Amino acid sequence: MYQTLLVPLDGSPRAESILPHVEDLATQFKSKVIFLQVVGPPLQFVNPSLYETTIQTDIIHEYVTDFKRKKEEISTYLAGIQEGFQKKGIEVKILVEQGAVVDSIISIAQRENADLIAIASHGRSGMSRVFYGSVAAGVMQKIDRPVLIIRSRNL
């Protein structure tokens, strides 16, 4: 039923609360699992003409260097999770992408032909959800395929 499961993670214990559910689904359906972490986009100036070109170049260089470092750290983190799943006979792929989080998740789900997106939600409601936003809610509102959302608490 579910051949490919996309699992966005952010490195937090809350996000990882989805992992036992993903493991069960992957085992039951012999699914491939894709672990994904998205690094947000670089700062964008409201009016770049206000800044000197050398400053912009320095900031861009710093961001690219920082992204490379983050990508290595994230890849190591995801490889640890990958190893645990592979030991249980589950096929796993890891991806580290750069961009707007919700849009990147949706784009990758389509590109990788994911049958299900499995994600943990922080369980915010009311004004805190409005103020902080919700990746899970954003994905659910825009995606064209099933989404499994697990509400994580007290982690």
Image (cartoon, grey):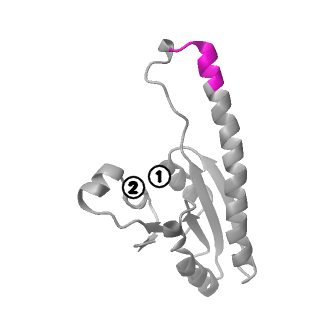
Q: Is residue 91 left or right of residue 3?
A: right
Residue type (three-letter) at the residue carrying disc 1: Val
Residue plotted at (59% across, 56% down)? 37
Q: Position of residue 31 (x, y in %)?
A: 64, 77
Q: Position of residue 123 (x, y in %)?
A: 35, 67
Secondary structure under tag 1 reads helix
Residue type (three-letter) at the residue carrying disc 2: Gly
Give the answer, above or below, for where 72 lies relative to 30: above
Q: Position of residue 155 (x, y in %)?
A: 46, 71
The residue tagged 1 is 102
The residue tagged 2 is 138
Q: Position of residue 87 (x, y in %)?
A: 75, 81
Residue plotted at (50% across, 45% down)? 100
**Crowd class of label 2 (few under 14; some 14 to 19; many from 20; radius 10 Å):** some
Q: Tell me if residue 50 can be seen.
A: yes
For marks 1 and 2 on the same chain, the one whose residue lies earlier in the sequence:
1
- Report the number of numbered marks: 2
The segment highlighted magenta reads 51-58
Q: Are marks 1 and 2 in contact (CB under 8 Å)?
A: yes
Q: Does the magenta-highlighted stretch encompass residue 22?
A: no
**Foreground pick, 153 / 141:** 153
| Mark carried by residue 35 | none
- Residue that sits furthest to the bottom in the current view: 28
**Foreground pick, 126 / 146:** 126
- Residue that sits furthest to the left in the current view: 126
Asked where in the image residue 11 lies, by quadrant, the reply is: bottom right
Tell me how far mark 1 sits from mark 2, CA to CA.
Answer: 6 Å
Residue plotted at (52% across, 74% down)? 18
Q: Is residue 16 left or right of residue 96?
A: left
Residue plotted at (40% across, 65% down)? 122
Secondary structure under tag 2 reads helix
